[in-house]
Image (cartoon, grey):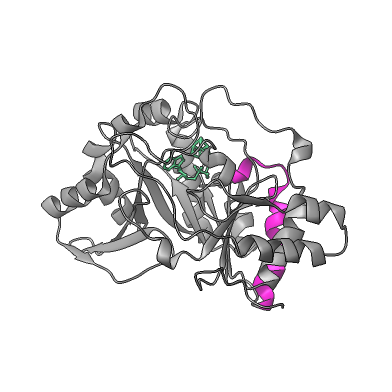
Amino acid sequence: MTAPLIDPFARAITYLRVSVTDRCDFRCVYCMSENMTFLPKKELLTLEELDRMCTAFIGMGVRKLRITGGEPLVRKGIMTFFRAMTRHLETGALGELTLTTNGSQLARFADDLFAAGVRRVNVSLDTLDEGKFAQITRWGRLAQVLNGIDAAQQAGLRIKINAVALKGFNEDELPTITEWCAARDMDLTWIEVMPMGDIGNENRLDQFWSLKDVRAAYERAYTVADLAERSGGPARYVRLEETGQKIGFITPLSHNFCESCNRVRLTCTGELYMCLGQEDMADLRAPLRDHPGDDTALRAAIRAAIEHKPKGHDFDYSRQQPGGQMSRHMSHTGG
Ligand code: SAM
Ligand code: SF4
């Protein structure tokens, strides 16, 4: 192993999120437009290149790998990649291999994921109402996702539900979703909607449901205790005394979490984004492809990129317009 990755603000980079595809079988309204143009295949890192890339990061101190997308489980042959990462779990170089998924393919892959060493999975689910689910995902079917969650739990995977907080959409479901998660022993995290990508006619300020208000809704119904726990990311946690459940709040817009940021994001084309809220990125595909079989240039490019990790992001809704709006889609950087 070479020296660990430390950025200019003395933050150790130990967490890599990797988007393995920009494609998806859903078209969630806050994430994609209905008619997305996806990247040509040759632009994507191959499964072997993804392996080389992740292995280089692990060699430089990355302990946690989260596979995302687009929908990671629609990438052809993705289980080959997961199985390849198992070797790093076995040596202890990698502490955790995990993924974020819409759940549509979990029934098919849950056992394989467990066998590859995955133990925890984040499933994105914003509503338990079939009609509303079809409306928000455009192409998704709730029953398929619920089957996937069942299969994952049966396979021994621990599930955390991620729900995007959407004003006038799932506000009324807060108790239902919370009790459903409690009954199934699943943690729950609410995410503030972020200004990412051109998603058509939806007005994001209309969708914005502040997590301050979500928290207030919990306080009206439950006894809420703050937890000191930090994940190095934008999530803050509370415990509901009545259910014993841990509830997370991801508030990139209304809170500044950047001082403890331990993560970077790799896109499916091999661009490294040092911050979700900044355009600055480094191309790692060229040093990878130009030097097959030798990672010296790749490692140098990774180190140079980390030296440019910015102090923080520029998202700001306070002036009633989506300031700091990002032109790229969440499915590009990987949520
Ligand atoms: N397809 C997978 C899924 O849905 O879990 C993984 C990729 S998806 C881009 C990752 C997460 O980003 C999901 O939880 C999704 O709800 C969230 N997301 C997408 N667009 C968002 C936005 N504009 N604001 C906040 N969260 C968003
Ligand atoms: Fe697909 Fe996930 Fe984006 Fe929904 S949030 S469109 S499931 S990538």
In the rendered image, residue 275, in percent from the top left (x then y), is placed at 52, 54
Viewer-nearest residue: 21 or 83:
21
**Magenta stretch holds residue 22:** no
In the rendered image, residue 116, in percent from the top left (x then y), is placed at 65, 62
> What main secondary structure does the magenta stretch of the protein show?
helix
Q: Residue placed farthest to the left in the image?
A: 220
**Magenta stretch holds residue 80:** yes
296 sits left or right of 330 in the view: right
Viewer-nearest residue: 287 or 55:
287
In the rendered image, residue 261, in percent from the top left (x then y), is placed at 46, 64
Q: Residue at x 70, y 45 (%)?
A: 269
Q: Which residues are magenta?
A: 69-91
Q: Is residue 312 above or below residue 168?
A: below
79 sits left or right of 314 in the view: right
Residue 226, image quadrant: bottom left
In the rendered image, residue 307, in percent from the top left (x then y), is placed at 61, 65
Q: Residue at x 71, y 69 (%)?
A: 87
In the picture, the quarter occupied by the N terminus is: bottom right
Q: Residue at x 35, y 27 (%)?
A: 203
Q: Residue at x 27, y 48 (%)?
A: 211
Residue 105, image quadrant: top right
